[in-house]
């Protein structure tokens, strides 16, 4: 019969006493029983704090209840974790909010336990956030707003799409003082034009640009416009919005493959310039981060409905194609050159193409111009 394998010196003594005996079965059972009793006795002598549930004073549950009441922190390492077991001692934890509980557990558990743990994480996150902001009652509202924006401080190329900066969630953030010290300028405090430095084969378009909100930093996958040079502003906010609309047009995206990017030299006060800025502003100014820009552009509200956004973008494409002297038939040829394999992107691209073709047909019947023109 195999002996009990352990590093305890008492156990080794028992092993030598009864290990390897090869006799009748009854005798083996008797010896094994004696061996276990002697092993337990010797272990208790070596380690009187052993909790093996063999007696009332050695019950694990009693020891836990007694020690938890006066503890400042609790650490458990278990192979299996079930709420049914934890519920036996949950009322014995100190009421002190500073008590720290840490549980290192194996992967084996039940579905209800896993679901409760998930809910607990979310509650803990919300509690911490609420307590944090409740303590800021002496801080001005705009400062609290800046603190909340910390998680959006680093923008990546994949986070933007045409006319939106919230296409994907942020993964990184940085302390403002460190980001500002690294940049050495105040451009990040302004609205800026940003475009993806690399396009994917799954993207609907090659040129993907938008206006970035204030107080964000950008990674190297996002190219951004320069706002100040030697303390002098280089470009106005309306000009940024105008360029955003032009860069997102089919015409310029098509020219991107052939020529350097030519931009129409229009300025505020020009009829086409003002109309393009107004329409692009409706696509860009979604959310409170663009409230200032919305007011300066004279836009009442941003458009969030997907179908309405497609209509506005189609109208922009028509207006911008005219700036380049592109005829309706030439525009049809240009948009036909764009395709993508990704089913979702293909559907969105098809909807925009269809809206442009519908607007071309409508304008042929009404040569005065696009809707609202």
Image: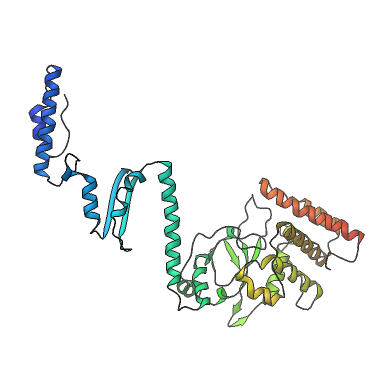
Residue at image coords 20%, 44%:
59
Please say whether residue 352 is visible from this viewpoint: yes
Position above or below: 15 against 194: above
In the image, taking residue 237 as reference, residue 189 lies left or right, namely: left
**The quarter of the displayed image where residue 280 is located:** bottom right
In the image, taking residue 231 as reference, residue 272 lies left or right, namely: right
Q: Residue furthest bottom?
A: 231
Instruction: Tell me the quarter of the image containing the N terminus.
Output: top left
Q: Quick one: 55 or 23, which is closer to the camera?
A: 55
Q: Quick one: 172 or 110, which is closer to the camera?
A: 110
Position above or below: 260 against 103: below
The tally of labels here is 0
Residue at image coords 87%, 65%:
369
Residue at image coords 9%, 38%:
42
Position above or below: 31 against 289: above
Residue 153 locus on image (x, y percent): 52, 67
Please say whether residue 81 is visible from this viewpoint: no
Residue 327 locus on image (x, y percent): 86, 60
Residue 344 locus on image (x, y percent): 67, 48
**The quarter of the displayed image where residue 298 is located:** bottom right
Instruction: Tell me the quarter of the image containing the C terminus.
Output: bottom right
Q: Quick one: 220 or 281, which is closer to the camera?
A: 281
User: Which of the colour schemes (rainbow, by chain, secondary structure, one colour) is used?
Assistant: rainbow
**The quarter of the displayed image where residue 220 is located:** bottom right
Residue 278 locus on image (x, y percent): 74, 71
């Amino acid at each position: 019969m195999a002996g009990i394998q352990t590093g305890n010196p008492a156990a080794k003594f028992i092993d030598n006493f009864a290990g390897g005996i090869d006799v009748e079965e009854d005798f083996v059972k008797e010896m094994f029983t004696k061996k276990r009793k002697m092993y337990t006795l010797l272990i208790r002598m070596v380690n009187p704090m052993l909790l093996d549930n063999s007696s009332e004073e050695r019950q694990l549950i009693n020891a836990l209840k007694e020690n938890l009441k006066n503890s400042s922190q609790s650490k458990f390492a278990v192979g299996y974790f079930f709420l049914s077991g934890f519920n036996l001692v949950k009322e014995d934890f100190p009421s002190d909010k500073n008590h720290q509980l840490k549980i290192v557990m194996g992967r084996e558990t039940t579905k209800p336990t896993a679901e409760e743990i998930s809910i607990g994480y979310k509650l803990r996150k919300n509690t911490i956030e609420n307590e944090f902001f409740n303590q800021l009652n002496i801080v001005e509202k705009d400062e609290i707003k800046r603190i909340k924006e910390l998680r959006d401080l680093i923008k990546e190329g994949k986070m933007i799409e045409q006319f939106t900066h919230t296409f994907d969630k942020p993964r990184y953030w940085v302390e403002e003082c460190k980001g500002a010290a690294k940049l050495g300028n105040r451009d990040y405090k302004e609205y800026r034009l940003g475009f993806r430095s690399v396009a994917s084969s799954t993207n609907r378009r090659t040129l993907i640009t938008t206006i970035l909100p204030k107080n964000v930093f950008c990674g190297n996958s996002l190219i951004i416009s320069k706002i100040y040079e030697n303390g002098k502003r280089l470009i106005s906010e309306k000009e940024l919005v105008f360029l955003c609309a032009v860069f997102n047009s089919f015409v310029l995206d098509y020219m991107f493959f052939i020529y350097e990017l030519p931009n129409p030299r229009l300025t505020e006060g020009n009829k086409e310039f003002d109309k393009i800025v107004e329409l692009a502003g409706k696509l860009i100014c979604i959310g409170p981060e663009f409230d200032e820009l919305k007011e300066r552009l004279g836009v009442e509200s941003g458009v969030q409905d997907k179908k309405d956004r497609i209509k506005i973008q189609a109208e922009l494409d028509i207006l911008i194609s005219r700036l380049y002297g592109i005829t309706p038939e030439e525009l049809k040829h240009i948009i036909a050159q764009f395709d993508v394999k990704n089913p979702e992107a293909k559907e969105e691209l098809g909807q925009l193409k269809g809206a442009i073709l519908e607007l071309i047909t409508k304008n042929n019947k009404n040569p005065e111009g696009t809707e609202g023109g």
